[in-house]
Amino acid sequence: MQRVIAVTLNPAIDLTGNIDELHPGELNLVNDFSRHCAGKGINVARILADLGADVTVTGFLGNNNQMGFESLFEQKGLKDQFLRVDGRTRVNIKLAESNTRTTEINFPGFHVDTAIQQRLFDQLRHQAGPDSLFILSGSLPQGVEPWFYAELIRALRAKGATVYFDSSSAALTEGVKAGPHLIKPNLKELSHWCGKEITTLEQALPFAHQLHQNGVAQVVISASCQGAITVSGQGVFRSTPPKVNVVSEVGAGDTLVAGLAWAAIKGWDIAQGLRFATALASWTVSDHGVHVPSMEALDYVLNNTQVESL
């Protein structure tokens, strides 16, 4: 089984509340809430660990509020290789409305100096090899430039590692230039990359082809309840999940990435992997938190997830 290294440069403590409707400038009452240690790479690692993968987690973590993360890593059996930095890991507030709209308020976190950045870069390059799968996920902390991801992807690929990359904005723009093996932007992130508003998977398809032609082996575009499309050397496929009662879309994209990674670990083909990942993400939006459902629940969603060749 491939060694999985999940990299989160900018983790967060997520405080997620569910409300009927958000009224700015007024008192808003939260129906229920959850608090958990997160970050895109950590979310992916949690799912993979639940599925049975052996996962190392690394990146940067603030010294002042690390205990919750350490408890999570121990609980999930994740190998902790995070570099500790001065300051606090950031806090994100997510307010999910009953109409599925989510408002996010992200607080600033720690600053990472160049010496610590180089330490992480060297650590990851040393770990890279043909038997390793690196999952680079999330935004950049203060002090880290967008080109960091691109240079890291090139270094890991030079050692024969497989690299999955899921980020946004300038980090995505720079990172795709390095030719990661897989990327998974959503429609909003793709819109930022191409400079045009993309609202459907049909509109996204030409840009997925463009990214593939530019050197990304597998391009996956996610669109929540619309499903996802993938373009790779094995062809073009679209997945359509069953209709579910959407509670919150928080973590759905990370779950999709985890499902795709698990499919690669198991050696499944592209279509089979897309179906599994879509089903897993579809179940996530109908439940609270980032975790794997029972096999009975997952089988139901799997049996009702469609994949077609385009």
Image: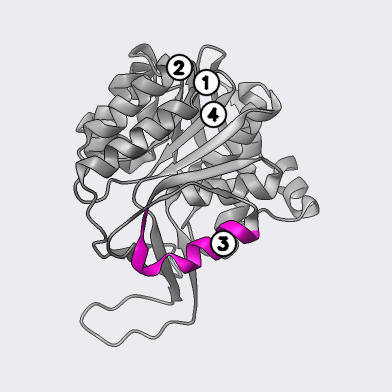
**Residue 94 in view, yes or no:** no
Question: Which span of residues is magenta-colored?
Answer: 61-75
Q: Nearer the viewer, mark 4 or mark 2?
A: 2
State the image coordinates of residue 97 (x, y, percent, origin top left): 41, 70
Label of residue 133 in the image: 4
Q: Is mark 3 on a helix, strand or loop?
A: helix
State the image coordinates of residue 3 (x, y, percent, origin top left): 60, 31
Residue of label 1: 129
Q: Earlier in the sequence, mark 2 or mark 1?
A: 1
Q: Which of marks 1 and 3 is nearer the N terminus?
A: 3
Instruction: Using a 10 Å C-alpha cutoff, classify the residue at mark 4 as few (fewer than 14 neighbours), some (14 to 19) or many (20 or more).
Output: many
Q: Which amino acid does label 1 sit on?
A: Gly
Q: What residue type is labelled 3?
A: Leu
Q: What element carries label 1?
A: loop
Residue depicted at x 34% and y 62%: 89
Residue of label 3: 72
Label of residue 159 in the image: 2
